Each structure stands twice: as structure tokens, then as C-alpha cells.
Image (tube, coloured by chain):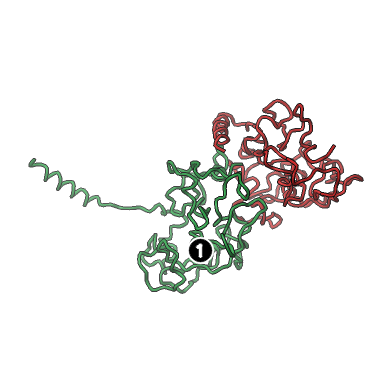
Chain colours: A red, B green
């Protein structure tokens, strides 16, 4: 913990010198693509990383915003999604649930990034392109890995969630990254806060690579190719 | 030698002439009540709206709160914050409720009692209880329900660590807090309780405005909007 703090302090000094966000895998949200503290569209909470998504106490704001979990402070998407289906998948995906709805509040591209804090209506800045989920138009999950699905012990293609290792920490298992110990969500593979990622190793190419997608395990480490996928899938 | 008494006398005269005027750090803050409720704060005091030096006739529910508390206490039953990722404990046994100094804050801020209900006053007066953004709990207007599920948890233990049931994303309480007080650690802004040091309202907020940097809002102990150190208050504890 202290080593991490020290690293952050040093990197923090580096960030002071540069207005641009320094992208460092595993160093926390300040050093990730989710650092919007000084983004032009952050008009409600300038100078805050946390405040873009969270609010410590309820403030007057639209009732559509979730109040009762993770202190969420953003407008949520009202989209109706087409779930992913597959003839080989035993679980059935319905509408996105849980923390994935929070992700989709930005990433489905229907709600402007400005829609938190004091901003209640704007149509200025949206997520587009490769960062948009679902990738297909019309909120269709047909081409995206399913989310908000139970991790079924009865599926012979999946590893045992209680005993199979997952993520960068040696003592954690698949179940530790399932919501409530059972549900696959965006956060199963991705760590929004850029903490639960092994610094310097969990990247697509030589570090520091900004496009590491905040994944909890690597997909292209030589000798452990696709280890993220294979951590769950028996292939 | 002969001049020493003269100097001493002059110094004493100067001291008497200049006098000593103490100014509260509350002056000008939202907690500066000197002129806010003149009907009941009849001497225009800073401190007496919350504290009283000796017991005066008042209901039993104003006692036993320590800190020489002089306000009527709320009897609201609170629904505490919970989340799938929260590891802190609100209570060792029984029903979790707000405890410690946060109960004092809620005697005004939960929106059930009027500001006038202090000292010997038993008449709630005409000023309405708190509502809007300064009220803690849902709903922010109308009748308070004690629903704290939308507020950052308080009266919870600072359950840091990497073991089972502990939060690996909290910093070591011996870490410097980062406020304007030199040497102040996270542990120093936690409040002791029977089940370990707890986060309370006073962990983030300094009601008396002694330890609040000039740029900070809401009487926060750390300026949370520094572009060069974003969300510095949140990240003082949260290792995110």
C-alpha cells in the first residue's frame, strides 16, 4: 500500500507539470482515461475525479438518477436494449442490471457526459466509436460479450468460480469479480478505477500503453495469451 | 534597575488599552448563528446555540450527549447506507444507527427539529426545519424519513486492510490526511467507538472552520476541486 502511495505521489508530481492526463495502468483513476477532473465538459465538478460519477450527499437533481447505490450522481440511460443471445450460451441475458447500468449511463452513447451535478439537460458530448457499448446501433448487444448474466455452475464450458483464480491479486477467484458473487457485469473484466490491474504487465503492448481497456488481466502477454478470457472459459 | 518598574507599568497599561479580542472562526460561516435566531439566541452568542457550560433546566433528551451539548436530539429512526462493496461496520450488535458526534449534527440536519430547539427553548418557533441540499437523508424536502441510503456512509468503522471483510481500497489510517493541519493523519479525523475508529460527519467536515482551507466548500477539511490534485478529499482515504 505504501509503495503504491509513493508511486502515486511521484506520478502526481509529474501530472502537475503536464495538463494532460498521464496514463499509467494500475495507478488509480487519476492516471486513467476516466480522469475527467479537468475535462472541458466537466462544468459541474471541476477539479474532481470522483464527483463526475459519485456524490457524497443527495443534491437536488432529476429523479431518474439512482440514489441508493454507490452514491451515483449521474443521469442513467433510458434505453431499451436488445440482449445478446447465442445457441451455446446457457445463461439468458435480459436488460442490463446492477453496476453495468452505471457504465452504460455514458457508454451506450445516449446520455451526454455533462449530465451530472448541476447539469440537467444537454446534448453536447457523447461517447462514440470504439468506446460505445453496445457496439451495434439501436442498443443491440448482438455483437458484445453478454453482461448482467448469471455465472452458471451448470455450464460445462465455464471454470469453477469458487476455486479458479481471477484478476491480478493472487488470492482472488472468479466469484470475487461477479456482482453479488454470481452475476457477470462490466466490472467483472474491467476495473473502472484503474486500481485492480497489475502495473506494467496488464497491457496490450509495452507499458505504458493507454489503451489497456482497464482490464483486470492481460489478453496478450507472451506465454499467457488470452489469459483474461481463459480465466473463465475452458477452451 | 530603576526603569524596570516603569517599563512593566507601561506594558501593563498597553495590555489594558489594547485588550484582547477573540474572534471565532465560525464568523461568516453558515454556522454563525449570532444574528440568525435573535428571538431565542438572546445574547447573540456563537457557542450557546449548540453548547452550554452547565446544566440548565431542559428536557432529559438533551443530556448525555457529551460535548456539553445543549440542543434537542432527534428521535428519527435511520435507514443506514449499504452497498455490495461496503466493508465498514455501523454497529457491532443490534440495529445499526447513527452514533457519536454525527447524532449531534443530525439534531439539525436530518430536518426534523427546528434550529430554535436549544438551551431552555421548548417552543420550535416559526423557522422551518432544514430542507434542501443542507438536509441529510431522503427526501430532501417534505417529511424526513431518516433514509440515509443516498448519503456517504457515516458512523461506520474505517475497515481498511486486505483481509476478509476489509476494504483494500482504503489507505492505512497512519497515512497523512492531507489537510491544512501539519502531521494530521487519517486516524486523527476518525472518532473512537466501541468497535473501532469510525468515520463520522466530522471526518470530512470541520464544523468550527478551524481546519478548513480557504478554497474548500461545505466546511470540508480538504479542497476537493484542486485541478492539480483532483478530488483530494475523497482520495485522502479512498485509494482509487
Q: Secondary structure at mark 1?
A: helix
Tell me if residue A34 can be seen.
no
Q: Is residue A179 visible?
A: yes
Quadrant position of the C terminus of chain A in the picture? top right
Tell whether B200 sits left or right of B32: right
Specify the quadrant that holds the N terminus of chain A: top right
Q: Nearer the viewer, residue B16 or A232?
A: A232
On the image, the x and y values in percent for residue B228 come to 55, 36
- The chain letter under disc 1 is B
Q: Residue at x 71, y 31 (%)?
A: A203
Q: Quadrant of residue B149?
A: bottom right
Q: Is residue A36 above or below residue A96?
A: above
How many labels sit on residues? 1
In the drawing, does residue B221 fall left or right of residue A78? Answer: left
Of residues A6 and A24, the one nearer the viewer is A6
Q: What residue appears at the point 43 percent right and 41 percent down from the top-left corner?
A: B183
- Mark 1, residue position: B108
Q: Position of residue A112 (x, y in %)?
A: 72, 45
Residue that extends furthest to the right in the rendered view of this protein: A87
Q: Residues within 10 Å of mark 1 (few under 14, many from 20)?
A: many
Q: Residue furthest front?
A: A163
- Residue A231 at x, y = what percent? 77, 38
**B13 or A17, which is in the foreground?**
A17
Q: Position of residue B25 (x, y in %)?
A: 40, 52
Amino acid at each position: 500500500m505504501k509503495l503504491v502511495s509513493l508511486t502515486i505521489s511521484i506520478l502526481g508530481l509529474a501530472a502537475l507539470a503536464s495538463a494532460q492526463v498521464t496514463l499509467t495502468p494500475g495507478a488509480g483513476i487519476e492516471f486513467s482515461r476516466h480522469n475527467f477532473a479537468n475535462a472541458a465538459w466537466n462544468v459541474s465538478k471541476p477539479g474532481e475525479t470522483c464527483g463526475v460519477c459519485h456524490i457524497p450527499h443527495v443534491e437536488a437533481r432529476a429523479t431518474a438518477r439512482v440514489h441508493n447505490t454507490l452514491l451515483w450522481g449521474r443521469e442513467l440511460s433510458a434505453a431499451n436494449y436488445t440482449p445478446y443471445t447465442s445457441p451455446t450460451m446457457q445463461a439468458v441475458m435480459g436488460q442490463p442490471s446492477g453496476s453495468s447500468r452505471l457504465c452504460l449511463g455514458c457508454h451506450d452513447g445516449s446520455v451526454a457526459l455533462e449530465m451530472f451535478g448541476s447539469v440537467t439537460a444537454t446534448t453536447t458530448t457523447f461517447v462514440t466509436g470504439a468506446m460505445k457499448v453496445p457496439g451495434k446501433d439501436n442498443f443491440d448487444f448482438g455483437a458484445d460479450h453478454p453482461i448482467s448474466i448469471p455465472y452458471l455452475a451448470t455450464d460445462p464450458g465455464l471454470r469453477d468460480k469458487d476455486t479458479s483464480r481471477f484478476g491480478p491479486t493472487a488470492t482472488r477467484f472468479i466469484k470475487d469479480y461477479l456482482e453479488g458473487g454470481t452475476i457477470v457485469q462490466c466490472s467483472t473484466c474491467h476495473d473502472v478505477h484503474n486500481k485492480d490491474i497489475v502495473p506494467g504487465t496488464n497491457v496490450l503492448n509495452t507499458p505504458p500503453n493507454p489503451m489497456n481497456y482497464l482490464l483486470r488481466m492481460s489478453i496478450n502477454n507472451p506465454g499467457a495469451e488470452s489469459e483474461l478470457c481463459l480465466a473463465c472459459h475452458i477452451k | 534597575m530603576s526603569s524596570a518598574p516603569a517599563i512593566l507599568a507601561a506594558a501593563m497599561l498597553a495590555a489594558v488599552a489594547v485588550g484582547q479580542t477573540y474572534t471565532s472562526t465560525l464568523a461568516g460561516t453558515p454556522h454563525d448563528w449570532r444574528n440568525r435566531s435573535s428571538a431565542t439566541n438572546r445574547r447573540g452568542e456563537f457557542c450557546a446555540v449548540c453548547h452550554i457550560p452547565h446544566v440548565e433546566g431542559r428536557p432529559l433528551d438533551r443530556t448525555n450527549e457529551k460535548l456539553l451539548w445543549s440542543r434537542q436530539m432527534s428521535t428519527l429512526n435511520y435507514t443506514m447506507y449499504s452497498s455490495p462493496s461496503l466493508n465498514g461496520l455501523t454497529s457491532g450488535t443490534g440495529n445499526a444507527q447513527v452514533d457519536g458526534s454525527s447524532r449531534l449534527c443530525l439534531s439539525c440536519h436530518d430536518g426534523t427539529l427546528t434550529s430554535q430547539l436549544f438551551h431552555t427553548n421548548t417552543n420550535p418557533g416559526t423557522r422551518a426545519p432544514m430542507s434542501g441540499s443542507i438536509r441529510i437523508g431522503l427526501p430532501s424536502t417534505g417529511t424526513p424519513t431518516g433514509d440515509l441510503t443516498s448519503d456517504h456512509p457515516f458512523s461506520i468503522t474505517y475497515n481498511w486492510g486486505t483481509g476478509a471483510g476489509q476494504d483494500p481500497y482504503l489507505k492505512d489510517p497512519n497515512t497523512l490526511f492531507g489537510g491544512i493541519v501539519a502531521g494530521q493523519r487519517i486516524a486523527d479525523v476518525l472518532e473512537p467507538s466501541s468497535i473501532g475508529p469510525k468515520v463520522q460527519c466530522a471526518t470530512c467536515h470541520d464544523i468550527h472552520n478551524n481546519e478548513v482551507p480557504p478554497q474548500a466548500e461545505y466546511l470540508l477539511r480538504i479542497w476537493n476541486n484542486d485541478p492539480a490534485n483532483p478530488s483530494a478529499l475523497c482520495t485522502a482515504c479512498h485509494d482509487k
